[in-house]
Image (cartoon, rainbow, N blue to C red):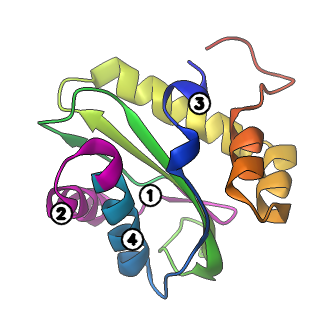
């Protein structure tokens, strides 16, 4: 699975303004509503419900909020580089500045897990995260996100 299967060029935000985790999720939900045609509220509530189970802040300034939606017909990704890092209750207590939102259909099962693993693998790569943090425009960020990893095999 390639990230280009999940993420369109229109799904990258280069300087998202948010002062808190909740506000970041709200802004991402608004953008995701535009991409999916689903209600912003439904997306926001689904993501908050998932966050209550445990933070999706995975460490190193990265968060991967995700959720399953009944009326969604495909996996949808959205990436945002925050203008300023926010507290995301991350595992390492570091603020988050890179957020990859993943929405999946209710019955996505294994595809949802494969997509999460692929996103995590891409964002664990220091070259990728360095490039993302050094990029100011959405197109450049998109290119870093979809580049094949040197150590990667087609997963």
- The numbered mark, 3 or 4, whose residue comes first in the sequence reads 3
Q: Is residue 24 above or below residue 116?
A: below
Position of 84 with respect to 50 (left or right) is right
Q: Which mark is residue 35?
A: none
Say which of 74 and 109 sits in front: 74
Q: Nearer the viewer, mark 2 or mark 4?
A: 4
**Which circle's residue, 2 or 4, is located before the other in the chain?**
4
* Residue in view at x 61 percent, y 14 percent: 155
Mark 4 vs 1, N-terminal side? 4
Residue 94 visible, this angle:
no
Dots 4, 1 in contact, CB < 8 A: no
Badge 1 or badge 2: first in the primary sequence: 2
Numbered label attached to residue 45: 2
From which residue to which does the magenta span run? 34-63
Q: Quadrant of the N terminus?
A: top right
Q: Write down the residue under mark 4.
A: 27
| Residue depicted at x 78% and y 65% | 136
Count residues near mark 1 (Cα–Cα under 10 Å), then give few for <14, some for 14-19, many for 20+. many
Residue tagged by mark 1?
A: 56
Frontmost residue, 6 versus 109? 6
Q: Please tell me whether mark 1 sits on a helix, a strand or a loop.
A: loop
- Residue 33 occupies quadrant: bottom left
Q: Nearer the viewer, mark 1 or mark 3?
A: 3
Is residue 48 shown left or right of residue 82? left
Residue in the image at 59% along x and 75% along y: 93
CA–CA distance between discs 1 and 2? 15 Å
Image position of 111 (left or right of 131): left
Label 3: which residue? 3
The secondary structure type at the circle numbered 4 is helix
- Give the mark toward the camera: 4 or 1: 4
Asked if residue 34 can be seen in this view, the reply is yes
């Amino acid at each position: 699975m390639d990230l280009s299967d999940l993420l369109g060029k229109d799904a990258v935000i280069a300087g998202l303004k948010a002062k808190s985790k909740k506000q970041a999720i709200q802004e991402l939900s608004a953008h995701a509503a535009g991409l999916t045609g689903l209600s912003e509220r439904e997306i926001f509530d689904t993501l908050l419900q998932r966050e209550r189970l445990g933070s999706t802040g995975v460490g190193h300034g990265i968060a991967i909020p995700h959720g399953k939606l009944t009326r969604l017909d495909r996996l949808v990704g959205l990436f945002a580089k925050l203008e300023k890092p926010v507290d995301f209750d991350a595992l390492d207590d570091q603020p988050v500045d890179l957020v990859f939102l993943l929405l999946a259909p209710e019955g996505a099962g294994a595809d949802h897990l494969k997509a999460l693993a692929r996103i995590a693998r891409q964002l664990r790569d220091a070259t990728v995260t360095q490039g993302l943090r050094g990029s100011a425009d959405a197109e450049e960020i998109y290119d870093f996100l979809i580049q094949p990893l040197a150590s990667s095999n087609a997963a």
